[in-house]
Amino acid sequence: MEVAPIGWIETAFVEKFGIPRQSMVVPQVKGMIQFYPPFNQIEYFKGIQSFDYLWLVWHFSAQKGRANKATVRPPRLGGNERVGVFASRSPYRPNPIGLSSVKLEKVHIDGAGKVSLEVSGVDLMDKTPILDIKPYVKTDIHEEARAGFTDDIAWQPLTVDMPEAVTAGLPEYLLTQLQAVLAQDPRPRTQDNPDKVYGMRFDAYDVHFTVKSGILRVVKITEQAES
């Protein structure tokens, strides 16, 4: 079986650290899906505007060379308890394929007639290959469905303190996304050192922060020099 990408997604996540652990956990996070020819033609997207949400099928491209595992340690369980890989959404899979539901914000068509899709609620790293797109329909919703260990352990967001003196110069659209991402606590679940300064890359910026007593404080944001 041969599978080839139909395109890729552009996001602010240039590294794995900080990416939301599931799609739609941070609905503010935007992405732009670009397509290879001939899939960038409008004929492939006729009628897509009538759907509010999409399924993205994508490749865990950053997992190259990493072996799949029979059991994994989900962050929701504190990074200590193991479950079977098929009872998780871990990237350590026999076939490195991801599935994300995202909101379709806008269909863009440039002067040459090429299509790109603006989406939100993404949990994908920048340049992630997109293998397929399918519409999200009402039969995909199962309101009474059990959700395993995610039902048992509440996801408690952090309070985010971002002083204006630190965020000055950060574009407003990125500031909104960053605050929502940080509230979900991007740290590995096995790390809880109140004295440690953590760092993550977000778009063209390096973000440094501490976490103590449920409060995440951003202490420094520096812009990366263009290469």
Image (cartoon, rainbow, N blue to C red):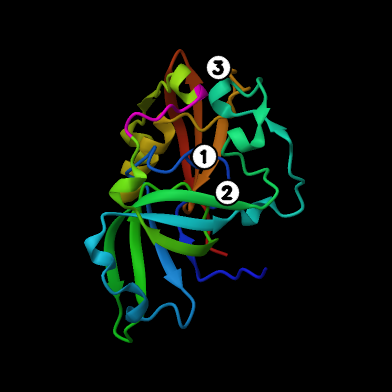
Q: Which mark is residue 15?
A: 2
Q: Distance between the residues labelled 2 and 3?
A: 23 Å
**Dominant secondary-structure state across the stretch colored magenta:** loop
| Image position, residue 77 (x, y; %) | 57, 21
Residue at position x 52%, y 22% in the image: 149
Three-letter code, disc 1 = Gly
Q: Mark 3 points at which residue?
A: 194
Between 18 and 58, the one lying in front of the other is: 58
Between 184 and 88, the one lying in front of the other is: 88
Quadrant for residue 129, please give it: bottom right
**Dot 3: element:** loop
Residue at position x 49%, y 21% in the image: 211
Three-letter code, disc 3 = Pro
Instruction: Pick out the residue farthest to the left.
Output: 50
Q: Name the residue under label 1.
A: 18
Residue 44 is inside the magenta segment = no
Give the extent of the magenta segment. 143-149
- The quarter of the rendered structure image containing the C terminus is bottom right
| Image position, residue 42 (x, y; %) | 32, 79
Q: Report the side of 93 relative to 9 (left or right).
A: right
Quadrant for residue 5, please give it: bottom right
Between 175 and 187, the one lying in front of the other is: 187
Q: How far apart are marks 3 and 1 (CA)?
A: 18 Å
Query: Does 142 appear above or below 94?
Result: above
- The quarter of the rendered structure image containing the N terminus is bottom right
